[in-house]
Image (tube, helix red, strand yellow):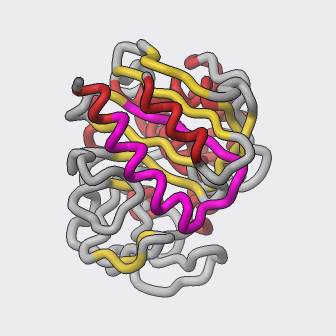
Amino acid sequence: MRSLAMVDEWPVETVATGVVRSDGTVLGRHGPTDRVFALASVTKPLTAYAALIAVEEGAIELDEPAGPEGSTVRHLLAHASGLAFDEPKVMAPPGERRLYSNAGFDVLSDHLAKAAGMPFAEYLRQALCEPLGMTATEIPGSPAKDGRSSADDLLRFAAELQSPRLLAPETLDEATSVVFPGLSGVLPGFGHQRPNDWGLGFSLRDHKSPHWTGRNSSPRTFGHFGQSGTFLWVDPDAGAACVTLTDRAFGQWAAEAWPAYTDAILAEVAG
């Protein structure tokens, strides 16, 4: 894919990127796709997927209590538990606001680990990484933001997100649809969104503006980006997904470069 060469113009030292279809066919790779990068919040979809596997296995339930009073696993996954950004401090009643919360994912992983009887990192390895052959992926710290992986591994995950083998399709459909519709909140890096729709661990494109995906991304696009200069999106209407990892923190450069890059990829996929 010629569009992938656009990343060579970015103000970053190292970038690895690739595009994959739902059948696992990689349409193109560019850069050191076997190199391990810090994921920052692209860790969250991995954690969420492990939690959804745990739901299907019966270890936890989406509507069982977890987190602050009145909150459930569903609230934690959807950033609707009311917990603060980076500390387990209650800022609002559950279900009232979309408060993006690293703390909520830490609480979620502790809840899952207790239910599964093993450390969360080990559950992730057994439930997600090993079955998909993601040998470079680990979460040595917070399940909200401390994951590490390669573009090659995340392309495998992005294929799974388009054609799930580890989850029932209806479970993934629920996770990538709006949970607690109508909640307003801040999309980190892009300001207040009304509504700030979210799925179960996945950021939803919908009609948000501004946004880190493309102008031509379909409203059904879902994924996540990270402050370490990383992103993963899946566009079901385009039938493709893109993974991009860099070694430069998110900033204005990314807010400007990523949407144009995404639109170029979509145009080439459709071409």
- Name the residue located 26 percent from the left edge and 38 percent from the top edge: 173
- Name the residue located 39 percent from the left edge and 52 percent from the top edge: 259
Looking at the image, residue 191 lies above or below residue 224 = below
> Which residue occupies the extreme right position in the image?
140
Magenta stretch, residue numbers: 241-265
- Name the residue located 39 percent from the left edge and 32 percent from the top edge: 241
Q: From the viewer's perspective, is 185 left or right of 60?
A: left
**Front in this rendered view, residue 89 or 86:** 86
Q: Position of residue 102 (x, y in %)?
A: 59, 65
Q: From the viewer's perspective, is 251 left or right of 168?
A: right
Looking at the image, residue 83 lies above or below residue 204 = below
**Front in this rendered view, residue 174 or 42:** 42
Location of residue 58 by image quarter: top left
Q: From the viewer's perspective, is 106 left or right of 210?
A: right
Looking at the image, residue 79 lies above or below residue 241 = below
Locate the C terminus and report the quarter of the image it occupies.
Answer: top left
Q: Position of residue 71 (x, y in %)?
A: 43, 69
**Front in this rendered view, residue 210 or 141:** 210
> Which residue occupies the extreme bottom position in the image?
91
Location of residue 270 by image quarter: top left
Q: From the viewer's perspective, is 260 left or right of 216?
A: right
Tell me if I can see residue 228 in this picture.
Answer: yes
**Front in this rendered view, residue 13 or 200:** 13
Q: Position of residue 26 (x, y in %)?
A: 46, 16
- Name the residue located 37 percent from the left edge and 77 percent from the top edge: 185
Q: Position of residue 67 (x, y in %)?
A: 53, 68
Looking at the image, residue 270 lies above or below residue 117 = above
Report if residue 34 lies within the magenta region: no
Tell me if I can see residue 57 in this picture.
Answer: no
